[in-house]
Image (cartoon, rainbow, N blue to C red):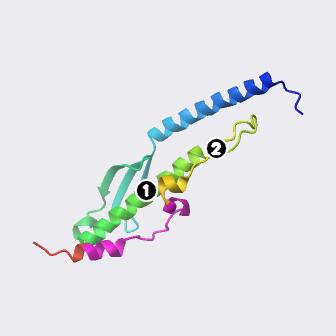
Amino acid sequence: MSSESIEQRLAKAMAELEATEAAVARAESELAHAESTVRSADRAVEVTVSAQGDLRALTFLDDKYRTMPAGQLAASVLEAVQEARARMARHVMATFEPFTKASPEAPEITGFDVDWKKIFGPGVLEGPKGGRRRGAGRLRDEISEDPED
């Protein structure tokens, strides 16, 4: 049995809770301004997304877009956006990961459970794609099959 009184344990738990609330506020503040910038594997486009996954910037690099088929350009944009969003999601997860663990100082505070897969989708948990171009062929086929006007 612990030699601490219930009042001491409660005070310790309250202090830990206040420290956690302050740390969460700092994390939220940091993420409010966080961005992830990624270039497509073919280095044709560069995108920047916010912590919420919103597209903030899209840059076409070195005039490569002028000679690319529409489907290929679309695939490059989507690839870069998906990778930037995945990187940002992993950054958000890493930022909030400490709050998912029980407190060593106050075991009564158990941390919170987060279903990251539900929030971000299963692909985020897989890590970087290593240049794999998901959906590139599908987009190219869909666009090339459209009749020209």
Q: Residue at x 48, y 54 (%)?
A: 120
Q: Which is more toward the observer, 144 or 64?
A: 144
Name of the residue lying farthest toward the top: 7
Residue at which label 2 appears: 98
Secondary structure beneath label 2: helix
Residue 39 seen anywhere in this rendered image of the structure? no
Locate residue 52 relative to residue 100 in the image: left or right: left
Q: Position of residue 90 (x, y in %)?
A: 53, 53
Residue at (73%, 36%) from the top-left corner? 108
**Vertical side of 121 occupied by 96: above or below:** above
Q: Hey, which quadrant is residue 13 in on the image?
A: top right
Lower sequence index among marks 2 and 1: 1
Decide if residue 139 is in sight here.
yes
Q: Amino acid at mark 1?
A: Ala
Q: Which mark is residue 84?
A: 1
Badge 2 crowding class, 10 Å Cα cut-off, few under 14, some 14 to 19, many 20 or more, is some
Residue 123 is covered by the magenta coloring: yes
Mark 1 lies on a secondary structure that is: helix
Name the residue rendered at 23%, 76% in the picture: 144
76 to 2, vertically: above or below: below
Magenta segment range? 122-142
Residue 59 location, x and y as percent? 31, 55
Image: 48 above or below 41? above
Name which residue type carries label 2.
Pro
Q: Residue at x 74, y 26 (%)?
A: 10
